[in-house]
Image: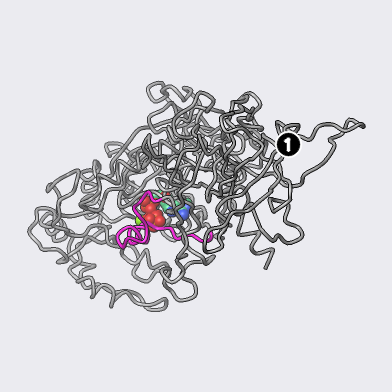
């Protein structure tokens, strides 16, 4: 077994730069050991579809979301992990909706989850895909297994109410109790059948596993397997009025799909004995001559959740943000949902790189959200074309430039991708610069524009400020300036020694006033201003950042208004670019051809770290 990684095998999870060697994480080590011993058997002829090789060791993972909300970045981690294993070991990856709870609004969630899983590269219908499944398709099988357990004396119908169960659950030294535990098997069989037939109201009774009322692991104190719920289900309609509990259902789902490595997060570690007990109880008395075959017994493996700082996850909380109007919806670009970060401009490559970067461990710890932001910076730096735009425009009139003259200057589309080439940008007598880039009375180290000072206009000319116009309130509304024609392209002409004859320290961005297009630009900051939202007061609402969204009317290069031949092809159709000096941006679906709407994905550098450094 090798303990370092071979380069990613390609298609799905292989953004540029992912081929570096890294140590195997602990789950990969488990898979490789299992493969070496053929623990899970080999792919048979009929099972080996396009991505698998007949006779190669079976590796079969799944992602099992409950369709009760949109997926978040934590789920993305699980998808990348599970799909990544299937792809790496030429196995299969299932998407399975864990729809064991009847509920009303699920279809919107189901559609969003499918889209998000695919966007992240989790191709459940591709060469390494095992397909799309529904837990509710197994309701009959689960019921039959439950009857089998009752027959074996491994489960019983308990008529305690929920309150009675909890008041009798005991304590670490004191066992739980149930007066129904030792009722005759026949009586439990009859009552369970009646539960299923709808003869009893919600809460009247449950089916419980008969395990160990004294167990120090409370999950084993005769857990509930079925509860009565007279509610229609989106998939099975009114066919059922009893619904299986997660622990009972999940292992059966994994087993029936032939999952080998059932990967979940650490909070399920204490449930693993139960996972194993249920499958063991089903298999008890099976496998001998004349008996039904044993069912497959996958291995549950737990890893630490992805928990970024300055972020609240968990669908329950995210739903509250949506319903209370704190954000504009599940896909608000400030949301840590997959839909939110996609709308924000994140790329799937960046998320996959992030997941590789944070790794897979057994130790819970929060991850600095800066790593998430850096992942997208790093990817977009390589692939995003550049453009210029001005967020808070200040007009500049260039007095030595003729009214009707337009100079077409060369603009490098992406210095990190030389193949992207150059394009032309217009320079005219009136331009806009950023208000921040001018100061009338600058401090010493201000290298941008000031009266009498010279700066470089990016890709254009050296510009000197010759005058300032103010309105009645004293606000600067326009600058007068001149350019040096000998600096075209942005360099001083060479002196006698061949080196540039003079230097300017500052370079600022600009747009031609005649050509610029107005755009609504949405500038985002973190939704929370505390590293651990809710830690101080117990309520994350108390740590909301009131300035998480600022909208400005910007003036941008008209190139941004519609798709351009110099742009890369974005697989998801979302156009992204760098506005020089301002950050990475993408085109929001609210855009119209008349008025682009841009989202700032991230600034170029981590502005929070800088703030901290400056105190
Ligand atoms: P939440 O409570 O955040 O809504 P969940 O665990 O209830 O999450 P499910 O739909 O049940 O959501 O989870 C689907 C899969 O995603 C599970 O295997 C779960 O372990 C995994 N998962 C959930 N949150 C994270 C996370 N923060 N990091 C990694 N995996 C996660
Ligand atoms: Mg859940």
Q: Which colour scheme is used?
A: one colour
Left or right of residue 537: residue 219? left
Give the image location of residue 189, x and y in percent.
Answer: 15, 56
Residue pictured at 21% horizontal, 46% vertical: 144
Mark 1 residue crowding within 10 angstroms, few (<14) / some (14–19) / many (20+): some
Residue pictured at 48% horizontal, 63% vertical: 528
The residue nearer to you, when weighing 116 against 391, is 391
Residue 83 in view in this figure: yes
Rendering quarter of residue 415: top right
The residue nearer to you, when weighing 55 against 315, is 315
Does the magenta segment cover residue 132? no
The residue nearer to you, when weighing 291 against 297, is 297
- Label 1: which residue? 484
Q: Eyeballing the image, is 341 above or below 44?
A: below
Residue 274 in view in this figure: no
Rendering quarter of residue 182: bottom left
Quadrant in which the N terminus appears: top right
Quadrant in which the C terminus appears: bottom right
Give the image location of residue 273, x and y in percent.
Answer: 42, 57
As helix, strand or loop, the secondary structure at mark 1 comes to: strand
Q: Quadrant of ligand 2?
A: bottom left
The residue nearer to you, when weighing 417 against 536, is 417
Residue pictured at 16% horizontal, 60% vertical: 188
Q: Give the range drawn in magenta.
A: 309-332
Residue pictured at 40% horizontal, 36% vertical: 118
Q: Eyeballing the image, is 426 above or below 509?
A: above
Main secondary-structure element of the magenta-colored stretch: loop
Give the image location of residue 97, x and y in percent.
Answer: 31, 44
């Amino acid at each position: 077994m090798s303990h370092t990684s071979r380069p990613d095998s390609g298609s799905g999870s292989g953004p540029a730069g992912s081929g570096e060697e890294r140590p195997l994480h602990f789950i990969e080590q488990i898979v490789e050991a299992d493969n070496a011993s053929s623990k899970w058997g080999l792919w048979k002829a009929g099972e080996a579809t396009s991505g698998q090789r007949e006779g190669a060791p079976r590796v079969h993972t799944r992602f099992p979301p409950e369709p009760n909300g949109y997926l978040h970045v934590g789920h993305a981690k699980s998808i990348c992990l599970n799909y990544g294993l299937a792809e790496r070991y030429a196995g299969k990856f299932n998407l399975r909706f864990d729809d064991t709870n009847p509920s009303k609004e699920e279809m919107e969630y189901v559609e969003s989850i499918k889209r998000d899983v695919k966007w992240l590269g989790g191709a459940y219908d591709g060469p390494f895909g095992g397909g799309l499944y529904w837990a509710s398709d197994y309701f009959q099988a689960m019921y039959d297994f439950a009857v089998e357990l009752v027959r074996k004396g491994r489960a019983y119908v308990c008529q305690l109410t929920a309150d009675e169960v909890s008041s009798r659950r005991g304590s670490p030294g004191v066992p739980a109790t149930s007066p129904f535990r030792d009722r005759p098997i026949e009586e439990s069989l009859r009552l369970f059948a009646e539960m299923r037939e709808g003869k009893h109201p919600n809460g009247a009774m449950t089916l419980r596993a008969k395990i160990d009322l004294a167990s120090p692991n409370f999950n084993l104190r005769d857990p509930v397997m079925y509860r009565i719920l007279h509610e229609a289900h989106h998939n099975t309609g009114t066919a059922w009025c009893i619904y299986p509990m997660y622990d009972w259902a999940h292992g059966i789902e994994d087993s029936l799909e032939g999952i080998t490595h059932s990967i979940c997060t650490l909070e399920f570690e204490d449930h693993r004995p139960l996972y194993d007990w249920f499958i063991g109880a089903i298999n008890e008395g099976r496998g001998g001559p004349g008996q039904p075959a044993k069912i497959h017994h996958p291995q549950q493996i737990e890893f630490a959740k992805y928990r970024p700082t300055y972020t609240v996850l968990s669908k329950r909380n995210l739903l509250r943000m949506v319903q209370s109007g704190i954000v504009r919806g599940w896909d608000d670009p400030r949301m840590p949902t997959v839909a939110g970060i996609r709308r924000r401009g994140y790329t799937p490559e960046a998320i996959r790189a992030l997941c590789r970067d944070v790794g897979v461990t057994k130790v819970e710890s929060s991850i600095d959200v800066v790593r998430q932001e850096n992942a997208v910076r790093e990817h977009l730096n390589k692939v995003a074309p550049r453009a210029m735009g001005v967020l808070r425009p200040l007009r500049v009139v260039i007095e030595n430039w003729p009214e009707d003259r337009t100079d077409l200057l060369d603009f490098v589309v992406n210095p990190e991708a030389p193949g992207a080439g150059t394009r032309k940008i217009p320079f005219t007598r009136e331009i806009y610069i950023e208000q921040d880039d001018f100061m009338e009375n600058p401090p010493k180290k201000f290298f941008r524009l000031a009266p009498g000072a010279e700066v470089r206009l990016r890709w254009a000319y050296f510009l000197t400020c010759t005058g300032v116009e103010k309105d009645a309130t004293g606000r600067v509304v326009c600058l007068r300036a001149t350019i040096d024609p000998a600096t075209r392209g942005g360099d001083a002409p060479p002196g006698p020694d061949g080196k540039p004859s003079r230097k300017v320290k500052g370079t600022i961005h600009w747009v031609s006033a005649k050509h610029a297009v107005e755009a609504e630009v949405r500038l985002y900051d973190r939704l929370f201003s505390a590293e651990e939202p809710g830690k101080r007061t117990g309520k994350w609402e108390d740590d909301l950042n009131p300035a998480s969204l600022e909208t400005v009317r910007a003036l941008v290069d008209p190139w941004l208004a519609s798709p351009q031949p110099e742009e890369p092809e974005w697989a998801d159709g979302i156009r992204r670019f760098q506005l020089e000096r301002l950050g990475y941006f993408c085109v929001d679906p609210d855009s119209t051809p008349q008025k682009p709407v841009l989202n700032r994905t991230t600034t170029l550098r981590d502005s929070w770290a800088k703030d901290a450094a400056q105190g």
